[in-house]
Image: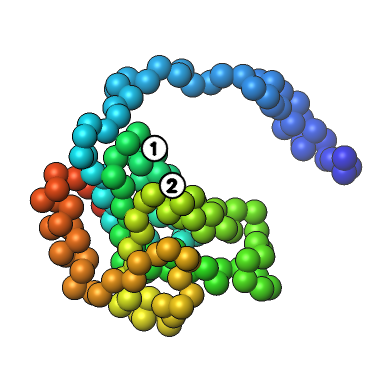
């Protein structure tokens, strides 16, 4: 430990750190709502307009869509605008696939899992073009879409009676 001043030592000793041992519960665990499972034919549709790694919005939306899928919902995610960048397989530094920081590929790996478990992932071509991203750089299994498909996909899933989770960043 570095040499501390008298005031630094006093400050450290005022309140013990950490005040609770690792593993202590500080939150209750009661789930308030039932753990709903899909009924026959139910659908869950997620719209994502958030940049990868600029907030947790995109990642959490993928996790929620995956959870809905595992509950039996037909589940799909539609990335548009800057959200399209979440679908790139070319993320990494200094080369693609290498993580420059822990968790850099969380979104990539979560999308691959979602697709492998039967989910559909759509990505707006216009959203890609706005940021100079190429269609051939998409994660395998991501379905490229026309810019006008955003509205029609929303209508399609709404008419199916889908639960719609729309996330928006900016």
Read off the residue under disc 2.
117
**In the picture provided, is 99 more to the left or to the right than 52?**
right
Q: Which mark is residue 70?
A: 1
Looking at marks 2 and 1 on the same chain, the residue that comes earlier in the sequence is marked by: 1
Q: Is residue 20 above or below residue 46?
A: above
- 3D distance between C-alphas at marks 2 and 1: 8 Å
Q: Dot 1 surroundings within 10 Å: few (below 14), some, or many (20 or more)?
A: some
Q: Dot 2 surroundings within 10 Å: few (below 14), some, or many (20 or more)?
A: few
Residue positioned 30% across, 21% down in the render: 34
**In the picture provided, is 41 more to the left or to the right than 141?**
left
Task: Indicate the secondary structure of the residue bearing disc 1.
Answer: helix
Q: Tell me where residue 108 appears, x and y as whole percent.
A: 51, 58
Residue positioned 66% across, 73% down in the render: 95
Question: Toward the viewer: 121 or 99?
Answer: 121
Q: Tell me where residue 47 appears, x and y as whole percent.
A: 28, 56
Residue positioned 30% across, 29% down in the render: 37
Quadrant of image for the N terminus: top right
Residue positioned 72% across, 32% down in the render: 11
Q: Which mark is residue 98?
A: none
Question: Toward the viewer: 110 or 74?
Answer: 74
Q: How is the image coloured?
A: rainbow
Q: Residue furthest left?
A: 159
Task: Indicate the secondary structure of the residue bearing disc 2.
Answer: loop
**In the picture provided, is 80 more to the left or to the right than 87?**
left
> Which quarter of the picture shows residue 93?
bottom right
Quadrant of image for the C terminus: bottom left
Q: Is residue 144 above or below residue 70?
A: below
Residue contact at pointers 2 and 1, CB within 8 angstroms? yes
């Amino acid at each position: 430990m570095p040499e501390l001043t008298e005031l630094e030592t006093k400050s450290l000793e005022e309140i013990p750190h950490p005040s609770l041992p690792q593993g202590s519960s500080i939150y209750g665990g009661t789930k308030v709502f039932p753990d709903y499972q899909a009924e026959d034919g139910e659908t869950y549709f997620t719209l994502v307009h958030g940049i990868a790694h600029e907030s947790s919005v995109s990642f959490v939306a993928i996790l929620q869509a995956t959870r809905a899928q595992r509950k039996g919902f037909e589940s799909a995610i539609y990335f548009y605008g800057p959200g399209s960048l979440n679908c790139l397989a070319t993320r990494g530094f200094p080369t693609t696939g290498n993580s420059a920081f822990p968790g850099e590929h969380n979104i990539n790996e979560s999308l691959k899992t979602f697709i492998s478990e039967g989910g559909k992932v759509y990505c707006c071509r216009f959203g890609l073009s706005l940021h100079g991203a190429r269609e051939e750089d998409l994660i395998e299994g991501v379905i490229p879409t026309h810019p006008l498909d955003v509205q029609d996909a929303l209508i399609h899933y709404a008419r199916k009676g889908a639960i719609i989770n729309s996330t928006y960043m900016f």
